[in-house]
Image (spheres, rainbow, N blue to C red):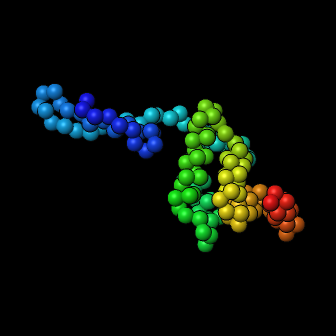
Amino acid sequence: MVDSRPTDEGAVIRRRRECMDCGKRFTTYEKIEQMPIFVIKKDGRREAFESRKIMSGLLRACEKRPVGIEDMEKLVENIEKSIYNSLEKEITSQAIGEMVMDRLKALDQVAYVRFASVYRQFKDINTFMEELNKLLDEK
């Protein structure tokens, strides 16, 4: 091995190697294999965790809002790290939704209300107003 350095914030290790026989150099990438995490849905179904689903929800909530894609990617990465660092093999969709809302509230309050209205399935204007009042009370 000639050189070794972390990339992707330490998630991947890049190693520069040299063949002992012919002297040619090549690069390998080593990534830590993560245990699969399953999401327990409201109806009891279990499915594999996919961070792209969080990003999809964020893209809809942040549509036409001054939230950069980098900020959304950081939010998703932060949630993904939290989930994997918990060392749990299963997590509820409700817990993921709460994590998204907690972080989205600090990022953009309008996007937060949009996300919450879908996630919490607001049934009428009163439910919507209750959430807005909670947001105003926190200020």
Is residue 48 shown left or right of residue 4?
right
Residue at the limit of the structure toward the top, as seen here:
20
Residue at 67 percent across and 52 percent down: it is 103
> Residue 12, image x and y in percent?
41, 39
Residue at 61 percent across and 46 percent down: it is 79
Quadrant for residue 10, please give it: top left
> Residue 44, image x and y in percent?
72, 42
> Residue 84, image x and y in percent?
58, 37
> Residue 19, image x and y in percent?
18, 31
**Residue 65 or 51: which is nearer the viewer?**
65
**Residue 37 or 2: which is nearer the viewer?**
2
Residue at 32 percent across and 34 percent down: it is 4
Quadrant for residue 60, please give it: bottom right
Is residue 126 shown left or right of residue 85?
right
Residue at 62 percent across and 59 percent down: it is 57
Is residue 32 shown left or right of residue 113?
left
Number of numbered callouts drawn: 0
Q: Is residue 16 above or below residue 78?
A: above
